[in-house]
Image (cartoon, helix red, strand yellow):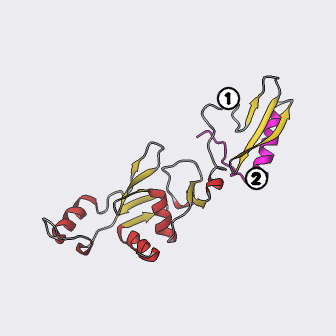
Amino acid sequence: MSAADEFHRIRSVLSYNPDTGALTWKVRDPSMFEDGKQTAEHNCAIWNGKFAGKPALSSPDKRGYLTGNLFSRPTKAHRAIWALVYGEWPIEVDHINGDPSDNRLSNLRAVTHCENGRNLKLKSNNSTGICGVWRRPSGRWAATITVAGSSKTIGTFDTVDQAIGARRNAERAYGFHNNHGRRT
């Protein structure tokens, strides 16, 4: 199946509201079903009665992303939305505000894996409230940043404010998103 056919097929079964982020199943035609124990028309009527107009790909996974099966394949809703709207499968999709269930189009952007890592929330074990800043046993403050999987030392500082300032400057220099390091 060509990519164009695949995206046409997605558009034939899913409806998307870009303002709310909601995906719903469209009414299906009997031609989308095969005869089996029951006729294609019967199977279609049963499917439409159960699913047409109802939320699609709406089951949260353990990380909070909405998922479901699309053409018998597990699919994350935000990836299906990107394919539905733009006609291509993205490398990765970033939820700009960090909420994995917020699939409004204004909250989604196609990114590389590296870019996605520049918009992460603050880790739960962080004790300073700032990514990459911590107090060394000497009492000085250290700042580091990870870029493309490589940790870079920014420096050590006398005050936490100096370390935070240096970290923020490095985030800007390496193109980190403004939301990087948010608490939620």
x and y percentages locating residue 91 in the rendered image? 56, 61
Q: Residue at x 13, y 66 (%)?
A: 38
Identify the secondary structure beneath mark 2.
loop
Identify the secondary structure beneath mark 1.
loop
Look at label 2 and name its amino acid. Tyr
Look at label 1 and name its amino acid. Ser
Residue 51, by quadrant, is bottom left
Q: Nearer the viewer, mark 2 or mark 1?
A: 2
Residue 75, by quadrant, is bottom left
Q: Which residues are magenta?
A: 161-184
Q: Residue at x 31, y 62 (%)?
A: 53
Q: Which residue is labeled 1 in the image? A: 127
x and y percentages locating residue 86 in the rendered image? 52, 70
Question: In the rendering, which numbered label is found on residue 144?
Answer: none
Residue placed furthest toward the right:
158
Q: Which residue is labeled 2 in the image? A: 174
- Which tag, 2 or 1, sits closer to the chain's start? 1
x and y percentages locating residue 63 in the rendered image? 48, 43
Asked whether 165 falls inside the magenta stretch, the response is: yes
Asked whether 68 falls inside the magenta stretch, the response is: no
Crowding near pointer 1: few (<14 within 10 Å), some, many (20+)? few
Residue placed furthest toward the left:
37
Q: Nearer the viewer, residue 19 or 86?
A: 86
x and y percentages locating residue 10 in the rendered image? 40, 69
Q: Nearer the viewer, residue 156 or 107?
A: 156
Is 153 situated left or right of 48 in this image?
right
Contact between labelled residues 1 and 2, with CB atoms less than 8 Å apart = no
